[in-house]
């Protein structure tokens, strides 16, 4: 079913290992977003957990959208996408591979953001941070699922790269609400058991949009 | 293209809208608690109904386009998205006008308001895509996928935002299981108004679809003419 998944994944990762473009761009962008948030709201105060959680998700959304677009844009730039489409690989498999690549890029940026978050907001390295990981991973999966499906818009439409966040962010709002609420609770010291409702919602969101992306991808990737 | 249907729809729309206006301003009794401002509800709810209907149509027509591949479904989903956006804007405006005297504020982040606003943003993005992009099959397929994903998102948005917060009055079904419209005249007015707005929607949709069909045909004729010219130049 997923024949060709491995080669595409390996190709993209090798490309990234040699150039490092996406990692550098994503990590620096997401860290910069954090810096902007700290400068705008201040690092301390009573609502520290909420602001830290908000900063985390803002960094994820904007860096993630660009990162996922990058994973597909690389294919378009040199016309590789034609070769990929001509090869005996199902479009759905291309989707799965690209989704995985986007997840890996986002995870790198997410890791950097988490570490900077602790430093900037004077949080503790420890349980609270570990509990953040599943919430963050579920959020990233949902975002990557949406972005990978819709990223073909950049390159096809004037100002497409700008249009992508405009399309993705409203779609992502349910996961954003769930993710930032859960993160704020966890950063304030609550256990994961207190946020199961939000986790379930994030999970449902992921299942819905990964399935939708898997089924619908062939319609957006094909060219005229 | 098909004149009679358009005229029938126009006349039906005018008459039903006049009837609805008469009922809203003359026939229906003033609500005891909220006073005169409650009458805007008879426009507010039908607009919301039409907006949801239109957005549903965007997805259904989009799915049919992906399945059957005929351009008419793409034109239909585009026309429905434009009208959905129009009525969604009206919902937000009429809601604000009502909320100012009743809640004392133009806007709050209540669940239904937030949901409607997110919907508005979603379809705003959809229309931006249509506005920026050229009219190609690629874009038509992309728009269809976006419309389907948008409708899939609606229930998740509703659930997430409801968990987040709500203060919107439950007019149609309160928690005690009775609806909030006590007087039968209120129910009658609401039904007439719903009918009037639905007919108005169908009429506007028809006109917009006719225009888009003509545009598609014109583009086809232009292509044909260009090809003929090329062939002529070679001879």
Image (spheres, rainbow, N blue to C red):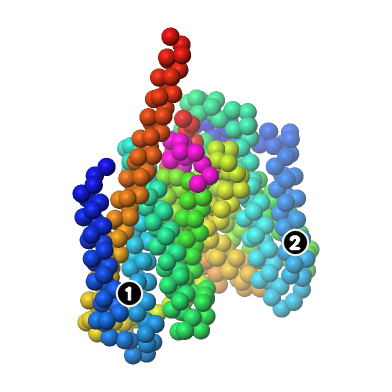
The answer to which image quadrant residue B11 occupies is bottom left
Q: Which of marks 1 and 2 is in front?
A: 1
In the image, A133 versus A205, the foreground residue is A205
Chain that bears disc 2: A
Report if residue A202 is visible in the image: no
Q: Is residue B101 above or below residue B212?
A: below
Q: How many labels does the image show?
A: 2
Q: State the image coordinates of residue B2 (x, y, percent, origin top left).
A: 24, 44
Q: Which range of residues does the magenta coloring cover?
A: B131-142
What residue did someone put label 2 on?
A36
> Element type at marker 2?
helix
Residue A180 shown left or right of residue B46 in the figure = right
Q: What residue appears at the point 54 percent right and 27 percent down from the top-left corner?
A: A82
Answer whether residue B22 is magenta in the image: no
Local crowd at mark 2 within 10 Å, few (<14), some, or many (≥20)?
Answer: few
What residue did someone put label 1 on?
B42
Q: In which quarter of the image is the N terminus of chain B?
A: top left
Residue B193 shown left or right of residue B52 in the figure = left
Confirm whether circles 1 and 2 share one chain.
no
The answer to which image quadrant residue A74 occupies is top right
Q: In this view, does B112 lie above or below B77?
A: below
Q: What residue appears at the point 39 percent right and 56 percent down from the top-left corner?
A: B83
Which is the main secondary structure of the residues drawn in magenta?
Answer: helix
Q: State the image coordinates of residue B186 (x, y, percent, origin top left).
A: 26, 80
Q: In which quarter of the image is the C terminus of chain B?
A: top left
Label placed on residue B156: none
Report if residue A54 is visible in the image: yes
The answer to which image quadrant residue A137 occupies is bottom right
In the image, B62 versus A103, the foreground residue is B62
Chain that bears disc 1: B
> Element type at marker 1?
helix
């Amino acid at each position: 079913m997923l024949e060709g998944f491995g080669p595409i994944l390996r190709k993209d990762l090798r490309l990234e290992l040699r150039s490092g473009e996406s990692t550098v761009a994503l990590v620096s962008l997401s860290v910069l977003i954090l810096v902007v948030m700290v400068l705008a709201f201040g690092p301390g105060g009573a609502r520290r957990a909420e602001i830290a959680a908000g900063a985390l998700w803002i960094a994820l959304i904007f860096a993630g959208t660009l990162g996922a677009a990058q994973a597909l844009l690389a294919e378009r730039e040199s016309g590789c996408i034609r070769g990929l489409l001509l090869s005996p690989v199902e479009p759905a498999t291309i989707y799965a591979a690209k989704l995985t690549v986007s997840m890996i890029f986002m995870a790198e940026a997410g890791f950097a953001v988490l570490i900077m978050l602790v430093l900037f907001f004077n949080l503790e390295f420890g349980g609270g941070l570990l509990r953040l990981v599943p919430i963050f991973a579920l959020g990233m999966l949902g975002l990557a699922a949406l972005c990978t499906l819709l990223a073909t818009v950049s390159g096809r439409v004037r100002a497409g790269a700008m249009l992508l966040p405009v399309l993705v962010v409203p779609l992502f709002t349910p996961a954003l609400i769930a993710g930032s609420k859960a993160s704020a609770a966890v950063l304030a010291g609550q256990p994961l058991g207190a946020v199961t409702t939000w986790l379930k919602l994030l999970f449902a969101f992921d299942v819905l949009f990964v399935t939708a992306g898997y089924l619908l991808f062939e319609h957006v990737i094909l060219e005229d | 293209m098909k004149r009679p249907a358009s005229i029938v729809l126009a006349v039906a729309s005018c008459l039903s809208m006049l009837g609805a206006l008469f009922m809203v301003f003359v026939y229906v009794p003033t609500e005891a608690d909220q006073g005169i401002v409650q009458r805007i509800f008879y426009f507010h709810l039908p607009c919301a109904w039409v907006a949801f209907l239109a957005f549903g149509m965007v997805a259904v027509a989009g799915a049919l386009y992906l399945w059957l591949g005929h351009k008419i479904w793409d034109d239909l989903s585009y026309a429905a998205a434009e009208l959905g956006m129009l009525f969604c804007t009206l919902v937000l405006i009429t809601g604000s006008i009502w909320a100012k005297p009743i809640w004392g504020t133009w806007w709050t982040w209540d669940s239904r308001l937030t949901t409607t606003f997110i919907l508005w943003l979603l379809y705003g993005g959809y229309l931006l895509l249509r506005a920026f992009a050229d009219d190609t099959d690629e874009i038509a397929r992309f728009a269809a996928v976006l419309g389907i994903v948008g409708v899939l998102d609606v229930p998740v948005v509703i659930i997430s935002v409801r968990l987040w917060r709500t203060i919107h009055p439950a007019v149609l079904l309160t928690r005690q299981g009775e609806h909030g419209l006590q007087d039968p005249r209120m129910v009658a007015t609401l039904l007439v108004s719903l009918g009037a707005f639905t007919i108005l929607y169908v009429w506007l949709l028809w006109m917009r679809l006719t225009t888009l069909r003509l545009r598609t045909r014109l583009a086809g004729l232009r292509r044909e003419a260009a090809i003929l010219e090329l062939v002529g130049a070679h001879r």
